[in-house]
Amino acid sequence: QVQLVESGGGLVQPGGSLSLSCAASGSILVVNNMAWYRQAPGKQRDLVATITRGGSTNYADSVKGRFTISRDNTKNTVYLRMNSLKPEDTAVYYCNARIRTTPLSEYAYWGQGTQVTVSS
């Protein structure tokens, strides 16, 4: 069984910074691509950033230059550093990871979500 546990959400003022982390644990052979998504009230879940096992990254246009995704493969953990936060960044943030549990089995797993609120 695999779990993704997120931490680091909270309330921050506009222009502030916040860091999220997400650790994968359980019967893991290898963690491949990892990503952060977010979902604002009444909206669909959108991709924020992705990172490959080798460290290649991609970002949504709305967060480029402000957010940084990184990972520590020794800890099966992905991070999201968010700077210059805006009210429109308010959402529940979810981590996602493609995890191989056996040589022939790879599935996508989700974290439980963590609330980020940007407000004065």
Image (cartoon, grey):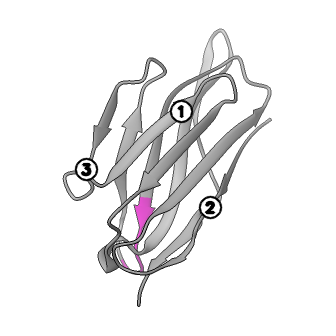
Dot 2 alpha-carbon crowd within 10 angstroms: few under 14, some 14 to 19, many 20 or more: some
Q: Position of residue 88 (x, y in %)?
A: 30, 76
Q: Which residues are magenta?
A: 38-42
Q: Quadrant of residue 58?
A: top left
Q: Which residue is mark 1?
A: 71
Q: Is residue 53 above or below residue 2?
A: above
Q: Which residue is mark 2?
A: 8
Q: Which mark is residue 112?
A: none
Q: Which residue is mark 3?
A: 60
Q: Quadrant of residue 82?
A: bottom left
Q: Is residue 21 left or right of residue 84?
A: right
What's the residue type where badge 1 is placed?
A: Arg
Would you say residue 47 sits in the magenta stretch?
Answer: no
Dot 3 alpha-carbon crowd within 10 angstroms: few under 14, some 14 to 19, many 20 or more: few
Q: Earlier in the sequence, mark 3 or mark 2?
A: 2
Question: Marks 3/1: CA distance?
Answer: 18 Å
Q: Look at the numbered disc 1 and give the secondary structure of its residue.
A: strand
